[in-house]
Amino acid sequence: MVIVRSGPQTAPFLWLIRQGVVTVAQAKTFTEQELEGLLQFVARQPYAARNRAMILMTFWAGLRVGELAQLRFGDVFDANGKTKPEIRLDPAITKGRHARTVFVSQKLRAELNAYALSHPSQQAADALFPTRKNAGRGFTPNTCAQHFLSLYKRAGILNASSHSGRRTFITQLANKGVSVRVLASIAGHRSIATTQRYIDVNDEMKRQAVELI
């Protein structure tokens, strides 16, 4: 048996992070105004309907971009082309390899129903978000992350990452009083400590907190 211990020889960058030598900035959280500005930007760009739906699935449902990239049309839409109220994520496409359910709000369902009308194939096995080069398979997790970074950069939004939508989603729910245990379940986190690291404590949270006295 070979025992691998954490040290600079194994996964050196991760080791430096754990030792506090290197720090990794948290993904930016968006204000409502910034999200609206982003949506206005993509509305003027090619693939507007697709990009709008991709953005809103991260900001309004908290999907990771790696999960988003691997969704098929049939994962999200039923046989009638209507958005399912719940999306079942297979363990193969989730970060922790654990199946989870994504609950889809009514306003997101309305957005996705509109997107379905513009989808080029509507075949259950085809990519939910096709690309120009590969309509059937769509994005890979890596190209999807790069796509989000490109959108943010071209929209003039600084310090945003492909994780910004998910972090904004969790922070906004926390700001509205959703308990961390519920948030952890929604996000698919196995530990509430992970969820707590996602929450961006802001001035509005502090204002609401002092009013509880």
Image (cartoon, rainbow, N blue to C red):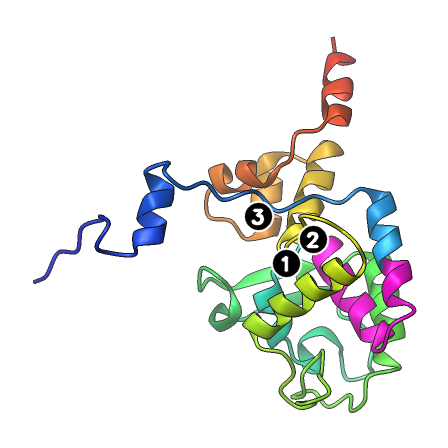
Q: Is residue 98 left or right of residue 188?
A: left
Give the spatial CA distance, label 1 vs label 3.
21 Å
Q: Is residue 6 left or right of residue 146?
A: left
Image quadrant assignment for residue 111: bottom right
- Per the picture, the main secondary structure of the magenta-coloured stretch is helix
Foreground: 157 or 55? Answer: 157
- Percent x, y of residue 67: 59, 67
Q: Which mark is residue 185?
A: 3
Tag 2: amino acid: Gly
User: What residue is shown with label 2?
Assistant: 165
Q: Is residue 119 left or right of residue 158?
A: right
User: What residue is shown with label 1?
Assistant: 162
* Front tag of 1 and 3: 1
Specify start and end residues of the magenta stretch as a single range.
39-60
* Front tag of 2 and 3: 2
Tag 1: amino acid: Ser
| Residue furthest to the left | 1
Residue at 57% of width from left, 48% of height from top? 185
